[in-house]
Image (cartoon, rainbow, N blue to C red):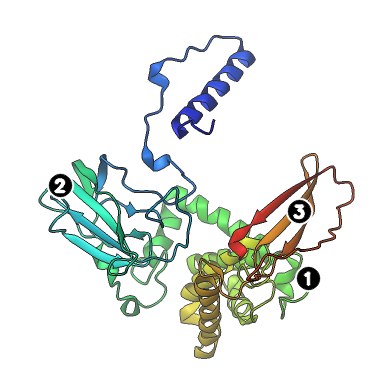
Amino acid sequence: MEDMTPQEILWIVIACLLVAWSWAHGSPVRIGDGARVPDDSRSHYSRYVNWRPADGEIVALNPPRMSWPYWPGWPNDWSDARHTFTLQISAKPDGSDPVANVTCPFNFYNTLPELKGARKWFWRVGYDVGTPQEKWSALRSFTLADGAAVWDRSALASPRLAERGHPRILFNKDNLERLRALARTNEESKAALAHMRAKADDVLKKPWWGNFPKTDREKEPKQEFYTIAADLCLVCFVWRMTGEDKYAGVKSRAVTWASYPPGGRASPEGLGGDGSEDATQGNEFLALLFDWLYADLTEAERQVMIRSLEWRIDHWMNSFAWRARGSRGPLVRLTFRRGDKHLGDQRLYLAPAPDWRPFEWRATVAEGATSVAVELFNYYG
């Protein structure tokens, strides 16, 4: 199957499912040309950020969402992803006189204005323009569909967030009362809030709520700390929507969670946090809590949360992610199972080194295990 396209593989999978259905129901299934899935290059290598829009695609959004691979030689080049990218969009087939000519450190660009004056557009991406490593992609094209929805996102390049104040994520001072009213007048909104309120009430019954941990270095609570942060977000949202005093305790608990120093169970991925790669979700939840609680926080409490967000984001962007400065190295994980039951795992971090060297690891096999999966994660390095 190595030489097959994703569409051919998908076609085989669909056929197998239909045959299985036929066996189960005893009726024939006829598969013809009409069942074929159209090829779409955006689905190739779908685990990675691909060229978007696809070459020659007719798009329903003006401007379309734009992204490109990290590497100019992709998919055969898997070298360092540290590049600067120059996006050019032109109405001319040779790419000259681009109406968009922007440079950014990310392999996507969102804050484009409406494209005017043409339906067919041509675009390319330059890698490390102005350096000896400069390379340009081939020129690609897309066409705006008749009636394409206009979404001018250029104002988002300078959002002037400071002027908007807090809260500003999901709700703000201008729409908060309208959202609260929806929960009273709209049946679906009322049901959604009732469901969330019941979930928040369950959080208030958890042991750690009544005795919130002063440190994240202990084995208790058993619940992972990043999921505790998620629970705090849920309670905070319900508090903001209802104003009920019983949820107000979320503030002190959120500040305590933010006060934990680096290296504990509440830390993001790469610093020992619970849940391996999921631990980084704690950054997201802490940011939401800071935004939603801002008006109730003292200046000292705000600084606690700001400092926590600063070191977390710095680690995530500059020490853990693609720069990998100061991390613990690649990870080998052994996952033990008995049938469908997960029996735990053992992990070995391979410290970064300039030369090849052997590692000796005596892992403890989980009692009752009948199988083990061995996985190497190089993104810890």
Mark 2: few/some/many CA within 10 Å (<14, 14-19, 20+): few
Label 3 – label 2 distance at C-alpha: 53 Å
Using the image, determine if residue 41 lies above or below residue 236: above
Q: Which residue is drawn at 32% across and 43% down?
A: 54
Q: Residue 90 carries which label?
A: none
Task: Indicate which disc, 3 or 2, sits on the residue closer to the N terminus.
Answer: 2
| Dot 3 amino acid type | Leu
Picture coordinates of residue 359, whole percent (x, y): 77, 63
Q: Where is residue 342 in the image (x, y as percent from the top left)?
A: 77, 48
- Tag 2, which secondary structure? loop
Q: Check whether the beta carbons of the residues at disc 3 and disc 2 lie within 8 A of each other.
A: no
Closest to the camera, between mark 3 and mark 2, is 2
Q: Which amino acid does label 1 sit on?
A: Glu
Q: Is mark 3 on a helix, strand or loop?
A: strand
Closer to the chain start, of discs 1 and 2, is 2
Element type at mark 1:
loop
Q: Is residue 64 above or below residue 15?
A: below
Q: Name the residue under label 2.
A: 93
Q: In this view, does 344 lie to the left or right of 276?
A: right
- Residue labelled with disc 3: 334
Most extreme residue toward the right is 367
Q: In which quarter of the image is the C terminus?
A: bottom right
Q: In this figure, which residue is indicated by the disc labeled 1? A: 220
Which of disc 1 and disc 3 is earlier in sequence? 1
